[in-house]
Image: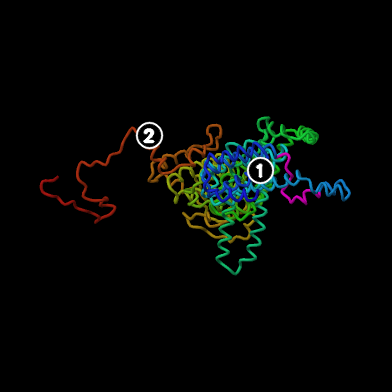
């Protein structure tokens, strides 16, 4: 028989598709053609033609599917597989020898080894760069069927873990795999559940490998760079899987509790002796209420994300996480306060990262009771000209307005923010000046105690304090006189109590009356109303201005109806650029050509 198999294997390249179908039909018809099994397995490889791979795959899938409940739990040698009943039942030597020689047990153990080989070659084809997308879809569907059927109707987490592991470490783009999982399988609650578990395992393995790599590649810089690139690639793949996996639902309904492993096909192929176990399993699953299932899903979701955020994330992944974490992660965590360390460290970094971390940190502070010391000092430090042209400026400016909304804020803090913003209005684009004006308008309306900043006469003595913070330091401050026109506000001061904003004025806003951009100069006039009368005024919506740019300003201007249009028209040709009284001697002459006026 071995010689026959060897002859067939030698002629493998000469097989046609029709002959391959005949091999599969013979294998399904009788156990006498079992030698066709290794031959069909040999056709499932990345080097084989796709039609040969599909034909062999379908034949082997049809052969293994009804046998899956009868196979041993794992591939093992016949001797080891037959030792289990001997130790359990404690038979004598004669009976154990009979069991050891049971051909049915040996045959099933051999089938299990071939099934494991089948799964292995399918994974190779799945992540091979030579495979076509259509073939990858068929292979992935076959593997997911085995996940459903192999464990007697229960989800086979081991094979699913191997699938995700192969996808994460593959050299091909994972988006195609994730599209299939998202469209067909992520709707099942058990698939999502074991996805969270697998991601947590991968992260722990990645952390251990990263630590060991740091200890072993200190001398070789090339090896260190390769390990770093491999680590970053794995982190990106894990993030792609986590971001595409749907989060747990807040209120689980019947449609949300549908399970991939709970199909009728798997239960129909069970052996009679497993019915007792199955009934007990169903009884246990019935005891789990939707609330309990939701809690377990949230717990696994939380563990997966918290473990992932401990990794050394690449900068682009770091920014993507911060940009979406307040919408996709925080609402679904079992305890959102567990993110406080990650978010506070991000907020302390400064720059764009701090701006992006503000949204999630604000949610933890307002909804989950997080206490963050020096929050407003950090927020004050983020007010720089570059933030008004940043990509995420709209969300930041809206959060800035929300953070300054409370009427319980000290007057010196509101004054410092108002003065800082007004100083920035002189150096930002016109769209930034518009949103700054709206922010100051809301600050003056919410905090009547700082309305004197709109117009404040200069004070001769510096020891006439107007703020709560400066009263404590009044005795230690030398008594000096300031010249008229000097601004008491210190723009470089980081301590909000010492900025001197309460003794300053918003003279920068008055400067905006003469801004070169007409919408800015027109909008400043809104501050001329008496904002202390709250009944006659309403707050401005920052979202109407936060996304502004030169393009939006230009678009608004060309749609605006103008009654009087200024024209650059002169009845006589001018002979000077400026008036002689202002700039004597600054004249120019226009050369007159003959025949031209």
Residue pointed to by mark 2:
559
Residue 357 placement (x, y as % from top left) = 59, 49
**Image quadrant occupied by the C terminus:** top left
Looking at this view, is 126 or 360 the one in front? 126
Left or right of 504 on screen, residue 514: left
Looking at this view, is 596 or 276 the one in front? 276
Label 1: state its secondary structure: loop
Looking at this view, is 316 or 460 the one in front? 316
Left or right of 569 on screen, residue 47: right
Residue 461 placement (x, y as % from top left) = 55, 56
Q: Earlier in the sequence, mark 2 or mark 1?
A: 1
The stretch of residues the image draws in magenta is 68-83
Looking at this view, is 324 or 312 the one in front? 312
Q: Which mark is residue 34?
A: 1
Residue 54 placement (x, y as % from top left) = 56, 41
Q: Does 81 appear in magenta?
A: yes
Q: Does 513 appear in magenta?
A: no
Mark 2 Cα within 10 Å, few/some/many (few <14, many 20+)? few
Please determine whether, in this image, residue 493 is positioned above or below residue 90. below
Label 2: state its secondary structure: helix
Residue extending furthest toward the bottom: 219
Mark 1 Cα within 10 Å, few/some/many (few <14, many 20+)? some
Left or right of 109 on screen, residue 7: left
Residue 370 placement (x, y as % from top left) = 68, 46
How far apart are the alpha carbons under marks 2 and 1? 79 Å
Which of discs 2 and 1 lies nearer the camera? The answer is 1
Residue extending furthest toward the left: 594
Left or right of 52 on screen, residue 193: right
């Amino acid at each position: 028989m071995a010689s026959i198999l060897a002859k067939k294997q030698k002629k493998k390249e000469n097989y046609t598709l029709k002959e391959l179908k005949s091999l599969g039909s013979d294998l399904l018809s009788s156990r006498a053609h079992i030698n066709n099994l290794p031959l069909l397995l040999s056709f499932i490889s990345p080097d084989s033609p796709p039609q040969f791979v599909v034909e062999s795959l379908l034949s082997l899938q049809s052969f293994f599917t009804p046998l899956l409940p009868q196979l041993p739990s794992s591939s093992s040698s016949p001797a080891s597989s037959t030792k289990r009943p001997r130790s359990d039942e404690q038979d004598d030597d004669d009976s154990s020898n009979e069991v050891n020689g049971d051909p049915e047990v040996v045959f099933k153990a051999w089938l299990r080894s071939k099934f494991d080989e089948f799964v292995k070659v399918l994974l190779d084809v799945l992540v091979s760069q030579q495979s076509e997308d259509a073939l990858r879809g068929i292979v992935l569907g076959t593997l997911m069927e085995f996940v459903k059927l192999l464990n007697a109707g229960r989800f086979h987490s081991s094979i699913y873990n191997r699938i995700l592991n192969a996808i994460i470490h593959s050299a091909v783009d994972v988006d195609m795999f994730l599209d299939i999982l998202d469209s067909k399988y992520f709707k099942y609650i058990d698939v999502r559940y074991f996805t969270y578990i697998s991601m947590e395992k991968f992260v722990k393995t990645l952390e251990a490998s990263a630590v060991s790599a740091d200890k072993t590649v200190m001398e070789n810089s090339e090896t260190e760079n390769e390990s770093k690139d491999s680590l970053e690639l794995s982190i990106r793949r894990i993030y792609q899987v986590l971001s595409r996996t749907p989060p747990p639902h807040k209120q689980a309904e019947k449609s949300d509790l549908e399970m991939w492993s709970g199909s009728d096909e798997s239960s129909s192929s069970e052996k009679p002796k497993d019915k007792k176990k199955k009934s007990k399993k169903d009884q246990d699953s019935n005891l789990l209420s939707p609330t309990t299932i939701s809690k377990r899903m949230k717990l696994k979701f939380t563990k997966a994300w918290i473990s992932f955020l401990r990794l050394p994330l690449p900068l682009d992944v770091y920014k993507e996480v911060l940009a979406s974490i307040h919408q996709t992660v925080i609402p679904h965590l079992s305890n959102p306060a567990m993110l406080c360390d990650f978010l506070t460290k991000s907020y302390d970094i400064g720059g764009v990262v701090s701006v992006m971390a503000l949204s999630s940190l604000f949610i933890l502070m307002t909804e989950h009771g997080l206490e963050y010391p020096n929050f407003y000092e950090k927020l004050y430090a983020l007010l720089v000209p570059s933030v008004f042209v940043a990509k995420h400026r709209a969300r930041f400016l809206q959060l800035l307005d929300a953070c300054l909304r409370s009427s319980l804020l000290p007057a010196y803090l509101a004054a410092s923010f108002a003065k800082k913003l007004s100083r920035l209005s002189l150096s930002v684009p016109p769209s930034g000046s518009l949103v700054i004006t709206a922010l100051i308008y809301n600050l003056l309306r919410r905090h009547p105690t700082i309305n004197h900043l709109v117009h404040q006469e200069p004070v001769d003595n510096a020891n006439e304090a107007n703020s709560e913070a400066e009263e404590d330091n009044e005795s230690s401050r030398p008594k000096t006189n300031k010249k008229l026109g000097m601004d008491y506000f210190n723009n470089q001061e980081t301590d909000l109590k010492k900025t001197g904003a309460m003794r300053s004025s918003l003279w920068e806003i008055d400067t905006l009356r003469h801004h070169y951009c007409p919408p800015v100069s027109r909008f400043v006039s809104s501050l001329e109303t008496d904002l202390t009368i709250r009944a006659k005024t309403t707050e401005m919506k920052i979202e109407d201005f936060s996304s502004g740019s030169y393009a939006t300003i230009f678009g608004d201007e060309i749609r605006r109806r103008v009654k009087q249009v200024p024209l650059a028209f002169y009845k006589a040709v001018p002979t000077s650029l400026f008036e002689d009284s202002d700039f004597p001697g600054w004249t120019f002459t226009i050369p007159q050509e003959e025949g031209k006026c």
